[in-house]
Image (spheres, helix red, strand yellow):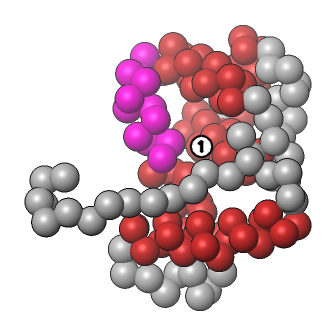
Amino acid sequence: MQGSVFTCFSDMVIDGLGMMAWSELLDEVKPESGGVYTNNQSYADEELFALVGAFCKKTNMPVTDAVTAFGKYLFTSLYRAAPAGVKQVDDLIEFLLMVDSVIHVEVKRIYPDAYLPEFTYEKTDDPNK
């Protein structure tokens, strides 16, 4: 997983609980990376899963709630960091497709080995899907 996801998770923990809480999570998990993350590196997905698990244990938050909160925090952060042209969209689907077709293309150009998600969706007539 890209380091930007890890740095954003650490920012969320620090913003919400403080630096000491982040240090405690790292002490508990003892990630292989040592808990030093940079945006342009890739890290094992299991490190993030372990950190989220430790966060949930520390806060007594269900995993689904923690993942939802992190998703909101992550996309808010990504939106703020996005180039102006990417921000000129009307909804989340357009934003994600723009991230995939513009930002990820540039990330791959600079970091060819980057592991990035792809965003696709299927439009339906059913508003409940």
Q: Quadrant of the N terminus?
A: top right
Q: Residue at x 13, y 53 (%)?
A: 128
> Position of 120 compared to 51: left or right?
left
Read off the magenta span. Answer: 59-71
Q: Report the amino acid beneath label 1.
A: Met
For residue 80, say whether it is visible. no
For residue 115, say whether it is visible. yes
> Position of 112 compared to 86: left or right?
right
Using the image, determine if residue 6 lies above or below residue 127: above
| Quadrant of residue 58 within the rendered picture | top right
> Position of 26 compared to 83: left or right?
right
Neighbour tally class for label 1: few under 14, some 14-19, many 20 plus, Cα within 10 Å: some
Using the image, determine if residue 112 lies above or below residue 30: below
Q: Residue at x 58, y 69 (%)?
A: 99
Residue 62 sits inside the magenta stretch: yes
Measuring from the top left, give residue 19's x and y in whole percent: 72, 34
**Residue receiving disc 1:** 12
Q: Residue at x 67, y 46 (%)?
A: 5
22 or 111: nearer the eye? 111
51 or 23: nearer the eye? 51
Measuring from the top left, give residue 26's x and y in whole percent: 76, 21
Measuring from the top left, give residue 61's x and y in whole percent: 41, 22
